[in-house]
Image (tube, rainbow, N blue to C red):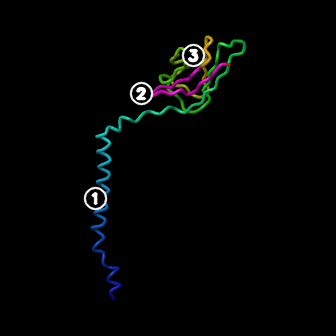
Amino acid sequence: MKSKRLFEDDAGVSPVIGVILMVAITVILAAVIGTFVLDLGNQVQSSAPQASFSFDEAVGNSDEVEITHDGGDSISQDELSVNCAGNDVSNPWSGDSVSAGQTHTCTTGGDNVVQVVWESTDGSNSQILAEYEIN
């Protein structure tokens, strides 16, 4: 008879659930307030796009290199530049964004390295997406 009463008595369940909910709410509030106080939201940086580029030296003219966007993310024209002959060439491709299949011919002027460089719109982050060394 007493075992039946054991399964029917649920008087202690409500306080335990209440305590668990209060602890969860406290932890969530502490995380949100900590994020604002430590200003962690402004430290999130934009990440570089994932794109593939290929380089082909022009036949008969060793000073020209054709750069082709082979695939991956489309990149805004404003965020992409080509470092060719030591000069940064902004907006070398046609259109508002650079996508797969688009090409650009770069005159190296004897410089051995050509780079495709991405820079975030706010200028806080940049990365070399592709680099080619002329033999």
| Position above or below: 125 against 61 | below
**Residue that protrudes farthest toward the right in the picture:** 60
**Residue that protrudes farthest toward the bottom in the picture:** 1
- Rounded to the nearest angstrom, the CA distance separating label 1 from label 2 is 40 Å
Q: Secondary structure at mark 2?
A: loop
Q: Is residue 72 magenta?
A: no
Q: Which residue is mark 3?
A: 84
Q: Is residue 132 magenta?
A: yes
**Residue that protrudes farthest toward the top in the picture:** 109
Within 10 Å of disc 1 (Cα), the crowding (few <14, some 14-19, many 20+) is few
> Residue 60: where, in percent of width, then height?
72, 12
Label 2 is placed on what type of residue? Ser
Q: Which residue is mark 2?
A: 124
Q: Earlier in the sequence, mark 1 or mark 2?
A: 1
Please state the extent of the stretch shown in magenta in the rendering.
114-134
Residue occupying the point 57% across, 33% down? 72
Label 1 is placed on what type of residue? Met
Residue occupying the point 31% across, 65% down? 17
> Residue 58: where, in percent of width, then height?
69, 16
1 on left or right of 123: left
Q: Earlier in the sequence, mark 3 or mark 2?
A: 3
